[in-house]
Image (cartoon, helix red, strand yellow):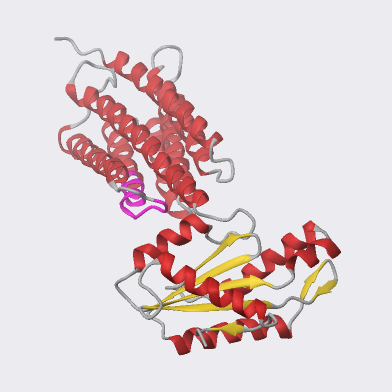
């Protein structure tokens, strides 16, 4: 069988262009995070560098093919890694990415323009790709935000580590046995390089699509369990958390109602009323412990769940909340709005071991607090 290495080179260019287009489409769905846009740009730069390399002997001078083509490939790979760091919410840290790019450009220029030596050009190219691919793999070895399953991420990391192995083999072979004088001569030394490039970037594209799909799935799940106005959990998400914590532990449930909230809407308008709800949510969240959960159940009613908490501690926090609203009005557009709250307290296991039981008891006590004049906390049946 005769190897057609130039066809493999053309196929490589086509694969990288298609991956760049796929990353561009993914970036359209992540417009708040330009990391994937950078990945698409970097991938297209790699494709352009490959194209220049592949056109060697077809009207493109060796100096342009080697120095600019290989330089574009390395710079494109560095851009991809920087984009991935941004995508995953990490600092870009360009310095460590540009060092191998600059060294590669310098060595390629030297071994073309000063001392024409394809062996050391090949070694320098391989060394630069080992460096960049190790950094690439490291980004995928680190846990990613909103991850459901690490499989896709680890697949990309494994493929990059395989690329490191191929690059090491190529560099060592070139240094010890020499590299083929013709980049497109039909030998496996040349063919493996292109096959490796095709496979690792196909693995990268598949992995990124799966990783981004998981992130989207997690974001949608968060949105489904969140209140769009305050950013707190909604009723559905909150009940799920409470049900997961019960009945294995003692806990406190606070039901909180903003007193006379309808009067605030009537007097100041619904926009001001929404601002009051948001500020109330901020005040609640400021006192939230890491293990606690808080939600807006609907309208002006909020709920606070505190696992592993005594009745005394729950009552003390409820009083602190009530006093805080009584002592500090909410300011909306320069206007002070006097807001008071009423709170009903239920405790597990004494008042029940399920969400329906605790909610019923806390709701009865909240109703009693409102019936007795509001701006108060009720934590017992007496």
Q: Image quarter for residue 10?
A: top left
123 within the magenta span: no
Name the residue located 23 percent from the left edge and 22 percent from the top edge: 191
Name the residue located 31 percent from the left edge and 15 percent from the top edge: 6
142 within the magenta span: yes
- Residue 304, placed above or below residue 148: below
- Image position of 286 (left or right of 90): right
Report if residue 5 is visible in the image: yes
Question: Which of the image's four quarters has the N terminus?
Answer: top left
Pick the front one: 148 or 39:
148
- Image position of 167 (left or right of 20): left
* Percent position of residue 371, x then y: 66, 78
- Image position of 119 (left or right of 278): left
Magenta residues (range): 133-146
**What secondary structure characterizes most of the magenta part?**
helix
* Percent position of residue 314, x then y: 49, 83
């Amino acid at each position: 069988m005769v190897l057609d290495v130039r066809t493999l080179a053309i196929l490589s260019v086509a694969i990288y262009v298609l991956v760049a287009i796929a990353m561009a489409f993914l970036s359209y769905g992540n417009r708040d995070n330009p990391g994937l846009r950078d990945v698409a740009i970097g991938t297209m730069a790699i494709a352009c560098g490959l194209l220049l390399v592949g056109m060697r002997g077809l009207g493109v001078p060796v100096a342009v093919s080697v120095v600019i083509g290989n330089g574009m490939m390395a710079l494109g790979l560095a851009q991809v890694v920087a984009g991935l760091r941004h995508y995953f919410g990490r600092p870009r840290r360009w310095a460590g990415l540009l060092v191998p790019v600059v060294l590669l450009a310098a060595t390629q220029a030297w071994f073309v323009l000063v001392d024409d030596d394809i062996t050391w050009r090949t070694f320098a190219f391989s060394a630069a790709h080992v460096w960049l691919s190790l950094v690439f793999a490291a980004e995928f070895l680190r846990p990613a935000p909103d991850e459901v399953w690490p499989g896709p991420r680890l697949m990309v990391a494994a493929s990059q580590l395989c690329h490191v192995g191929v690059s090491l083999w190529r560099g060592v072979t070139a240094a010890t046995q020499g590299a083929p004088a013709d980049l497109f001569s039909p030998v496996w030394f040349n063919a493996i390089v292109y096959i490796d490039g095709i496979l690792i970037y196909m693995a990268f594209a598949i992995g990124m699509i799966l990783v981004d799909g998981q992130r989207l799935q997690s974001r949608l799940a968060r949105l489904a369990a969140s209140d769009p106005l305050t950013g707190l959990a909604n009723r559905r998400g909150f009940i799920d958390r409470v049900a997961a914590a019960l009945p294995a532990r003692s806990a406190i449930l606070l039901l909180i109602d903003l007193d006379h909230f309808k009067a605030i809407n009537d007097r100041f308008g619904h926009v001001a009323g929404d601002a009051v709800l948001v500020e109330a949510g901020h005040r609640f969240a400021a006192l939230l412990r890491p293990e606690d959960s808080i939600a807006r159940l609907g309208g002006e009613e909020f709920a606070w769940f505190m696992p592993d908490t005594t009745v005394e501690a729950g009552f003390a926090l409820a009083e602190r909340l009530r006093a805080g609203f009584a002592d500090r009005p909410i300011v909306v557009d320069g206007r002070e709005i006097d807001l008071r709250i009423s709170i009903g307290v239920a405790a597990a296991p004494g008042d029940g071991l399920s969400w329906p039981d605790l909610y019923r008891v806390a709701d009865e006590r909240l109703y009693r607090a409102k019936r007795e004049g509001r701006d108060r906390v009720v934590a017992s049946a007496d």
